[in-house]
Image (tube, helix red, strand yellow):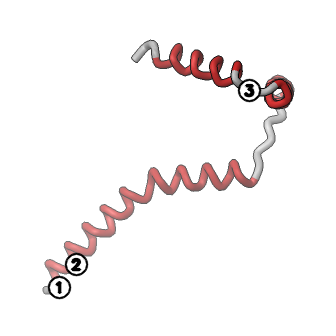
Amino acid sequence: MFNNRRVEEDLERIRRANLSPEQFEEEEKREREMREAVRAGEVRVTVKDIVAMTIAIFSLILPYLAVFAAGIALVLFLFLR
């Protein structure tokens, strides 16, 4: 439970150690740009980010909505029978 973060960090170190030099430099550049953007306060939100957030919201709300709709349908079925 508490070592999960450490295991994740170790796996990340192993993955980065196995990257080719070009891929390593590209990833370092990408991370550096993200850190600079976060420091400057200009985090870019893309269309993919918005789609991912929308899917996440639907995945949280949809099961409750389905249960509610099924409950209403059951009540209507019982009363209108």
Quarter of the figure with the C terminus:
bottom left
Q: Secondary structure at mark 1?
A: helix
Q: Residue at x 17, y 85 (%)?
A: 80
Where residue 22 appears, as percent x and y from the top left, is 85, 29
Q: Amino acid at mark 1?
A: Leu
Q: Tell me which label, 3 or 2, sits earlier in the chain.
A: 3
Where residue 24 appears, as percent x and y from the top left, is 80, 25
Q: Which residue is mark 2?
A: 76
Q: Which residue is mark 3?
A: 19
> How far is mark 3 from mark 2, CA to CA?
60 Å
> How far is mark 1 from mark 3, CA to CA?
65 Å
**Residue nearest the observer in this picture, 73 or 47:** 47
Q: Amino acid at mark 2?
A: Leu
Q: Which residue is mark 1?
A: 80
Q: Is residue 31 visible?
A: no
Please report contact status of discs 2 and 1: CB closer than 8 Å, yes or no. yes
Where residue 70 appears, as percent x and y from the top left, is 28, 69
Please report contact status of discs 1 and 3: CB closer than 8 Å, yes or no. no
**Number of residues whose C-alpha sits closer than 10 Å to that of mark 2, classed few (under 14), some (14–19) or many (20 or more):** few
> How far is mark 2 from mark 1, CA to CA?
6 Å
In the depicted structure, whether residue 28 falls above or below residue 45 = above
Horizontally, is 2 left or right of 19 in the view? left
Q: Nearer the viewer, mark 3 or mark 2?
A: 3
Q: Secondary structure at mark 3?
A: loop
Q: Residue at x 54, y 50 (%)?
A: 56
**Number of residues whose C-alpha sits closer than 10 Å to that of mark 1, classed few (under 14), some (14–19) or many (20 or more):** few
